Structures are given as C-alpha cells and as structure tokens.
Image (cartoon, rainbow, N blue to C red):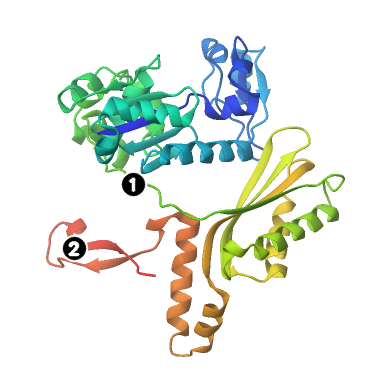
Amino acid sequence: MVVCVYLPRFELVLAAGGPGALAGRALALAPPAGAQQRVGEVSGAAEACGVSRGMMLGEALARCPEMALVAPDPVGVAEAWEESLSALESIGAALEPAAPGLAYFGADGLMGMHGSAEAIVAAARRALGRPARMGGAPTRFCALAAAMAVRSRRALLLTDGQARRWLAGRPVTLLGYREETAALVAPLQRLGVRTLGELSKLGRAALTDRFGVAGTLAHRLAGGQDTPLRARSLQERLAESMEVGEASSGEALGRVLGVLVDRLLARPERRGRTLRAVTLSARLLAGGGWSERVVFRQALSDPERIRLALSLRLLLLPAPACGLGLTVERFGPPASEQVALAQESRTARAARLREAVAQMRAVAGQEAALRAVCVDPDSRVPERRVVLAPIPE
C-alpha cells in the first residue's frame, strides 16, 4: 500500500504566517519576480470567487478585486518542508517528495514495525505535528485521490478491489497534480470530460492520438495504474546563515557571502570534499524570501572561485536582504583525488567524462545522462531496437 501525505496550501500558509491568517480572507501567492504573471496557491475565500492556482494575475483580480497578494517565501517553505520530511522519515518511511506539501511512502515495509496501516498513518500524524490529509491505496495516484477526498483527521484507506471503482468517480482535475498530465486538465474539461471514469471510456488509443505520451499516462492513471515509488536518497546537507545587518545590498553583501563560504569550507563535516551544487538563499527586508540553486561547472573547493560564481547570483536579488544563507546540496570528490586524476594522462579523459556526467545529473536529475544500447537491431519496432541505459560514473 502507498500512503499519500497532503498538506493543503502549504506554501500559502507559511507565507501568510499560519493557518489562522487564511480564515475568511481572499489571499493568493504573488508571482515570483521575473516569472510569468500567474498567481500561486490561493485561499478558500479566493477559490469561492473563481480564482484558481496558475490563473493569470489580471483575470484573478478581475474575479476577486478584494484579493490580497502574499509575497512567496521559498526559503521558509524549503526549510519547513525538509523538517516535515525528516519527521516522516523518523518513523521509518522511505519518502518520495512530489512537491512542497505532497509526499508518498510505501506502507508495506512498515507493517512489522507499526502493526497495521491505521497505526502507520497515526504514527505519521504524530511525527508531523500539524494537520494533514492522508490516504492509502495500491498506487500513488489512487492514494493521492484518497487524500484529496478526506475532509477530516481520519484517513481513507482503499484496498485493491475498491480503488479502481472508487477512482472512476473522482474529478479529472486530479491530473493537475502530476507534472506530466497537468496540461491535459483544461482541454479535457473543454471537451466535457469531468471524471476519471469518463476519461477511461475514451480509450487509450484515442487519448494517445490526441495528447501523445501524456494521454497514454492519463489513461493508465485513470485505470488505477501507476509507476513504482522512487524514494529519495538521503544526502548530507551542510548549511550556514548570517544576518546581514546594514549590509543589505552591494559590496557589503558580497563580503557577507565570502564569510559564509569560508565558514562552510571550514566545517569538519566537509571532510575535504569539493562542492558540486549549492543553494544560495536570502530573507528579504520587505518580507518573503529568495533562493537560487547553483551547480558549478566543476566541483570546487577554492573559496575564491566559489565566491566569484555565487556573487554573480547576488545580482538577481529582487530586493534588499536582511539575511543570507548557503547550503550544500551535493558534494564532489575530495580535492586531492581531483588533482591525482588530472595528473594521470591516460585516465584524464575518462575522469572528465565522469565529471561531466555527474554535473549533468546534478543539474537535471539521474536520467539526464543515458547511453543508447543496441538490443534487437532486426526488430520492426523502433522502440525495441535501442534502449537507454544509465552511464556509470
């Protein structure tokens, strides 16, 4: 069984200052600086006026003129979400985070520890320490639908026989919670498709012909099928932060950044390793936060090169900052190992290739670097002739 943990309006609640700030108020997350003018999460009062997440700002204000915009706080959201994930992992759950406020974990491996699915859900609630909707089902998408249907502290747990029949009556808007199928919601609603059962009746061939791979996936999801869970790998994270005081912008802020870099490199937990990817974050004087993930072209341990690379990102700050933070997302090999590889002429090319593969995966994920392997060259089906396999680092 897969358990879905859903914290409604997670980003908006944190940015607004708590659940009580949403009561009876029409609120929405303001569009991030430089992004397309679409609102983020909206409160219940704004939804009652016809405003929805992703709507153009002008249309949202036309439908709800009294709606107030709240500055997003990506730094606070990331910290609070990581704290929630760590709390869930403390009960033994192997988590797959989907988005801030939405995560999945398998319950079968926890039965011996907690006894039953109900006990697992109860343990997850105690670990979170905050209200959450939870649902359980054989697949991830069914568990999401169950969690969305819950309106109380009691979880909805579906067995194999119940899940598919129950899923047929759920709204097609559930596809919007999957990145691959989110774009299908609007055209399906225009076609008059309201439920997942109606979507299944259209047939896989018709959906594939109209929407391509996304249509095939939508048909599988509506039929109760889904891909297996992919639990996140636990990675060591180091972080340093500092209040900037009067150094809210300009060269003084760059000197604060240099102090953070020096502190991070001096941490004994680094154990001589280089830095491959870091997150630079700031708390803004006007409220909210800002963050930027930086993947270095080469894993670095030189403070001057790290400071130079990060100082360019400081120019993207949308407003003066009151606090600056630096977090290591991924480590590289030890600095001594890099030097040894560079001095070996026969292995230098292989080392550069491994470094390029590791950098690409740090930027775009584990499936960003693959190699083509010829399996059945005589097959008439193109997909069977060549398959993609990961490149070993």
Give the left or right position of residue 64, taking residue 168 as reference: right
In the image, what residue occupies the spot 57% across and 75% down?
A: 335
Would you place residue 54 above or below residue 349 in this image? above
> Which quarter of the image is occupied by the N terminus?
top left
Amino acid carrying label 1: it is Arg
Q: Quadrant of residue 95?
A: top left
> Which quarter of the image is occupied by the C terminus?
bottom left
Give the camera-side residue of 274 and 165.
274
Residue lying at the far right in this picture: please name it: 246
Query: Label 2 crowding class (10 Å Cα cut-off): few <14, some 14-19, many 20+?
Result: some
- Of callouts 2 and 1, which one flags the residue occurring earlier in the amino acid sequence? 1
Give the camera-side residue of 33 and 309.
309
- The residue beneath circle 2 is 385
Query: Label 1 crowding class (10 Å Cα cut-off): few <14, some 14-19, many 20+?
Result: few
- The residue beneath circle 1 is 230
The answer to whether residue 215 of the structure is visible from this angle is: no
Q: Position of residue 157 (x, y in %)?
A: 27, 23
Give the camera-side residue of 385 and 363.
363
Give the camera-side residue of 116 and 85.
116
Would you place residue 355 above or below residue 207 in this image? below
Q: Position of residue 88 (x, y in %)?
A: 43, 37
Would you place residue 237 above or below residue 94 in this image? below
The answer to whether residue 137 of the structure is visible from this angle is: yes
Q: Position of residue 280 (x, y in %)?
A: 65, 51
Q: Secondary structure at mark 2?
A: helix
Would you place residue 310 above or below residue 55 in this image? below
Amino acid carrying label 2: it is Arg
Label 2 or label 1, whichever lies nearer to me, is 1
Q: Quadrant of residue 205?
A: top left
Q: Secondary structure at mark 1?
A: loop
Q: Which mark is residue 155?
A: none
